[in-house]
Amino acid sequence: QVQLVESGGGLVQPGGSLRLSCAVSGSTLDYYAIGWFRQAPGKGREGVFCVSAEGSTYSPDSVKGRFTIFRDNLRNTVSLQMNSLKPEDTAVYYCAAAYLGCGTSWSKDEVDYWGQGTQVTVSS
């Protein structure tokens, strides 16, 4: 059974940075697409950034140029570096893994495994 454990959430001021990490156990990452979703109060779960098993990435326009994903197959980890954070980035962030996915989109319907989530709050 694949398990994903997130860390690194917290409170940050607008314009600040946070780095989220996800440790994967139970399987090697080599054959999975892996990445992050977020869910703000009252909203649906949105794909934020992903990297496929082949190394291609997807992210929506709302985070382009601000967020970066790092995948380390040797350590079985994936990290999300978030810079220039805005109040609208406030959400619970979830690490996710999928056998298939991370092409021209990153849909929650593609996900096979979820982490428990970590809260990110951007506020002054």
Image (cartoon, rainbow, N blue to C red):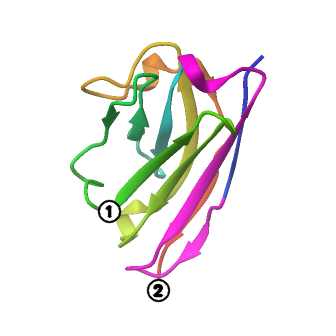
Left or right: where 3 falls relative to 42: right
Q: Residue shown at 49%/37% (left/top)?
A: 35
Residue 58 placed where, x, y %? Answer: 31, 36
| 35 relative to 15, above or below | above
**Camera-side residue of 6 and 43:** 6
Return the mark for residue 124: 2
The outermost residue toward the bottom is 124
Q: Earlier in the sequence, mark 1 or mark 2?
A: 1
- Marks 1 and 2, how far apart in space? 19 Å
The answer to whether one can see residue 16 in this image is yes
**Residue located beneath label 1 in the image:** 66
- The boundaries of the magenta stretch are 8-31
> Tag 2: Cα neighbours inside 10 Å, few (<14), some, or many (≥20)?
few
Magenta stretch: includes residue 25: yes
The one nearer the camera, 98 or 29, is 29
Where does residue 33 sit, x and y in percent of width and height? Answer: 48, 24
Quarter assignment of residue 83: bottom left
